[in-house]
Image (cartoon, rainbow, N blue to C red):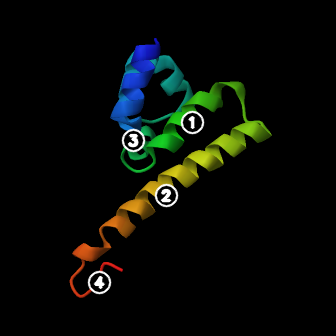
Amino acid sequence: MCCLFTTLVMLGPRAAIVVWWLLQPARWGLAFDTFIVPLIGFLILPWTTIVYVAVFPNGFDWIDIFWLGLAVAIDLMSWAGGTFGNRSRIPGRSAY
């Protein structure tokens, strides 16, 4: 199990979503009513989707909201970091 977890961490959150969905489809069905919401989460907010599925079955407590907020922040930072890192590709824009 440790090797599987390490491999998924190295591959990223989208690989973890696919493997977790294949291993526990009932948990995903419990967390989401339709297929479109986890698909959007897979494409745009993968860390938030993973944390939501992890905390949903037990209900939301204050610590669960903290984890969801942290996951949203990580997803937003990954989008902002990609934008900041590629700013030199915009014509007329300097790298600094």
Element type at marker 1?
helix
Query: Marks 1 and 2: which is nearer the front?
Result: 2
Q: Is residue 34 above or below residue 71?
A: above
The label shown at residue 32 is: none
Question: Dot 3: within a 10 Å radius of its alpha carbon, few (fewer than 14), some, or many (20 or more) residues?
Answer: some
* Contact check, label 1 and label 2, Cβ < 8 Å: no
Which residue is disc 2 drawn over? 77
Q: Residue at x 57, y 54 (%)?
A: 73
Q: Which callout, 2 or 3, points at the residue further toward the start of the chain?
A: 3
Q: Residue at x 29, y 68 (%)?
A: 86
The label shown at residue 42 is: 3
29 and 44: which is toward the camera = 44
Which residue is disc 1 drawn over? 51
Q: Could one spot residue 40 in this view of the protein?
A: yes
Q: Could one spot residue 20 in this view of the protein?
A: no
The three-letter code of the residue at mark 2 reads Met
Q: Which callout, 1 or 2, points at the residue further toward the start of the chain?
A: 1
Q: Which callout, 4 or 1, points at the residue further toward the start of the chain?
A: 1
Which residue is disc 4 drawn over? 94
Q: Is residue 62 above or below residue 19?
A: below
Residue lying at the far front in this picture: please name it.
Answer: 96
- Distance from disc 2 to disc 4, alpha carbons, whole Å, reads 22 Å
| 27 left or right of 20 in image | right
